[in-house]
Image (cartoon, rainbow, N blue to C red):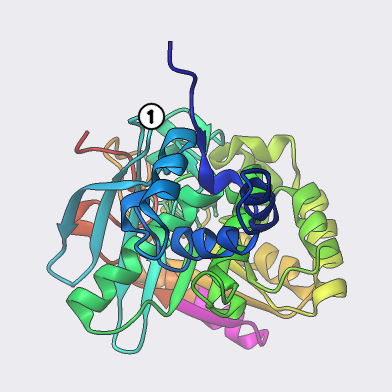
Amino acid sequence: METKKKDIRALTKEQLREFFLKQGDKAFRGNQVYEWLWQKSAHSFEDMTNISLETRQMLQDNFVINHIKVDQMQRSADGTIKNAVRLHDDLIVESVLIPTATRTTACVSSQVGCSLDCKFCATAQLKRMRNLNPDEIYDQVVAIDNESRLYHNRPLSNIVFMGMGEPLMNYNNVLKAIDKITSPEGLGMSPKRIVVSTSGVPKMIKKMADDAVKFKLAVSLHSAIDEVRTSIMPFNATFPLSDLRDALQYWYSKTKNRITYEYVVWDGINDKRKDVDALVEFCTFAPSKVNLIEYNPIDDGEFQQADSKALDMYINILEANNITVTVRRSRGKDIDAACGQLANKGQ
Ligand code: SAH
């Protein structure tokens, strides 16, 4: 029986160098292969044209390159592109390219499915199957960068971890992927152009602060009242708002980075004056920005976007309290590519 070959991209550069030394080759060969694997995103050992045939065969005998495969690409009328991405074990995740006049943003997944249970999110209806590896996250970004160059004549400019999964429940791999994305040996992107969006896992937010990460943080808040938040995001019972607030206060004290809150206003759920007042109160301990997201319905009709009167009330009161507020319109709704709609429907 053939033993299972190891994914070569699980090795660090140092480990690759050592591997070649052990083979009686030069450590430098490791650098060359590493460059093929990351900077040049080689899909096979055959692509590595400056490596001898013999060495390529030896690599082939020892390793696999578990590259993702874009199974299906859908293009929306507004230019948004959604990729259904097949992993080496045939599981599927989705990632999205969102073009605007000035930027191209990649929205990437961090897990297959999600272990959290937000009532308004289609991904939550898939259970969490597994975490993505760093290379599987990196590959989604490379695929979108290529599509951006091909269809929009410019490279990718921004990345948001707002696809499937909770990035802070797969923190180590997300961090490793971001290291590769920002490294000159990978894509060389600035960490300031990366946003990690979390439902709010207090312990991990503190860890991020301790790790002095350079990317930005967004928190899916949706309500600053425990009772309300728990009813729509049940895990809030385990991580109540006071813990989240503590963690965010710590984050701000360490990073001095403004915090963005993502927030949907729903009819009959969080559309009252008391809801806005609680949000204003929650935003007082650190410079904050509130991103009001349009609700993207997910079939069962339990949630309805509040009317424009409720939205105006939010905007007016937040602005009166000097809190920056933006309203984000949905993109790619016609292909189920908008926030909360990623659920592998085509599969
Ligand atoms: N787990 C992470 C990232 C994935 S969700 C998080 O919770 O932040 C990305 C964003 O989409 C979150 O702000 C989430 O609350 C929001 N979202 C989920 N379902 C949605 C829906 N149906 N309509 C609009 N936004 C939704």
Q: Magenta stretch containing residue 336, yes or no? A: no
The stretch of residues the image draws in magenta is 314-326
Q: Nearer the viewer, residue 205 or 324?
A: 205
Q: At 32% across and 60% down in the image, what residue appears?
A: 96
Per the image, the residue denoted by label 1 is 89
Against 333, residue 323 (above or below) is: below
Residue projecting furthest to the top: 1
What's the residue type where badge 1 is placed? Asp
Which of the pair 279/156 is nearer the observer? Answer: 156
Residue 41 or 191: which is nearer the viewer? 41
Residue at 46%, 58% in the rendered image: 37
Query: Can you give x and y, in whole percent of width and height, for residue 56 in the image?
Result: 40, 48
Q: Nearer the viewer, residue 81 or 287?
A: 81
Q: Quadrant of the C terminus?
A: top left
Secondary structure beneath disc 1? loop
The image shows residue 166 at horizontal and vertical percentages of 56, 46
Q: Is residue 70 toward the left or the right of residue 285 in the image?
A: left
State yes or no: residue 324 in magenta.
Answer: yes
Residue visible at 49% across and 73% down?
187
